[in-house]
Amino acid sequence: MTIERERRGELGAFLRARRNQLVRADLGLPPIGGKRTSGLRREEVAYLSGVSVTWYTWLEQGRDIHPSRQVLDAIARTLRLSVAEHTYLLTLVGYSPPEPNVRPIPRTAPAHVQRLLDAIEGFPSYAIAPDWFISGWNTAYAALYPNVATVPPEDRNLLWLVFTDPYVRELLPDWEITSRRFLAEFRAEAGPRLGDPSYAQLIERLLDASDEFRAGWKSHDIEGFASRERVFHHPVVGDLHLEHHRLAPSDQPDLHLVIYTPVLTTDAPDRLDRLLQATRRTCG
C-alpha cells in the first residue's frame, strides 16, 4: 500500500469517526428514526459543508481526489473539529504543516543533546524521535523508569512501552486516561508520516499486542500536546507530582526533549531528591 493510499484511507476513516460522534441536537438536527441522537448522515455533512454528496462520499471512501483547502476547512467546521484535529485533516491531504524531512530517523540522540539531558540531571528527561522512539535519557529518568535502560532497542518506543510494559501501568495511576491521550498526541503528529516503514511496523505490532491500543486506534482521537501536571506512583518513593514539558532544539526540530519538573506546591521536590539519592547509592 502506497503512502498516498494509506493517507486517503486514514482520511476517510477519520471523517467517518468524527461524523458518527457528532450530537445531532448540537447542530439543530432531529434524531434519526426518532431515536438515534448522535451521528450525521453523509448527505447532511455535505449539505452543511456546501459540497456535493458524491464528492464527500468519495472522500470517505478514500478515492484518489484532491479537495481544496477551502473544502476541507468547511468540512472541519461542520464536523466541529478542534485545532489539532483540523491540522491533522489538512496534513493528511498534504497542505500544512509541510511534509517532514525523509532523512532516516536517528535512534541515538546527538551528542550535544545527550549532554543537555545530562546537565539537567535533577529532572527526569529524555529525547524522543518523530516516531516516538526514545533516543536518549538522563539518570533521573532512569530512576523514574528503570526499564528504559534494559529493554531491547527495538522496543524502546514510548507508545510501545506505555501499552505493553506492566511497570508503566503501575507507574501511572491514571493509565487508562494517559495512554489514550498519548495515543491521540501520537496520531496528531503521525499524519504526514503514515505509511513510513517505522510507523507502519510500530502500529502493526501494537495492534497485535494490545487490546487497549486497538480500541484507541479505532477511535481516531486527535489531541495536540500541552504541558500538564502528571502523577507517577513510584515503588520507591510513592506518588510524584511532576509537570510534563516538551521542547524542540532549534537545530534538531524533529527531536523533542521531554522534561519532568517537580510541582513545587507538593512534596515532589523532596521525593524526587530521595529517589535520586537512592539511585546514586545503588549505582555507586
Image (cartoon, grey):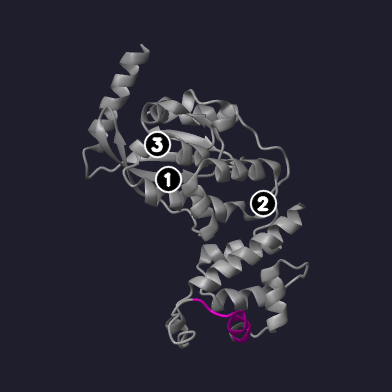
Q: Which residue is mark 1?
A: 245
Question: Which segment did they paint magenta?
Answer: 39-47
Residue 237: quarter of image: top left
Q: Going from the N terminus, do you reach mark 2 or mark 3 first? A: 3
Q: Is residue 130 left or right of residue 228?
A: right
**Closer to us: 4 or 86:** 4
Residue under label 2, please give it. 194
Give the answer, above or below, for where 198 lies relative to 83. Answer: above
Q: Which residue is pictured at 49% across the width and 54% down the height? A: 216
The answer to whether any part of residue 273 appears in the image is: yes
- Label 3 vs label 1, nearer the camera: 3
Let me know if residue 41 is in the magenta part: yes
Q: Mark 2 to mark 3: distance in Å? A: 26 Å
Q: Earlier in the sequence, mark 2 or mark 1?
A: 2
The residue type indicated by label 2 comes to: Leu
**240 drawn magenta:** no
> Please, which residue is most extreme toward the top here?
284
Q: In which quadrant will I find the C terminus?
A: top left
What's the CA distance linking mark 2 and mark 1? Answer: 25 Å
Mark 1 residue element: strand
Q: Which residue is nearer to you in this view: 246 or 68?
A: 68
Residue at 48%, 75% in the rendered image = 22
- Asked whether residue 249 is in view, the answer is no
Residue at x 60% of width, y 76% of height? 75
- Percent position (x, y) of residue 59? 69, 71
Above or below 80: residue 33: below
Residue at which label 3 appears: 168
Identify the secondary structure beneath mark 3.
Answer: helix
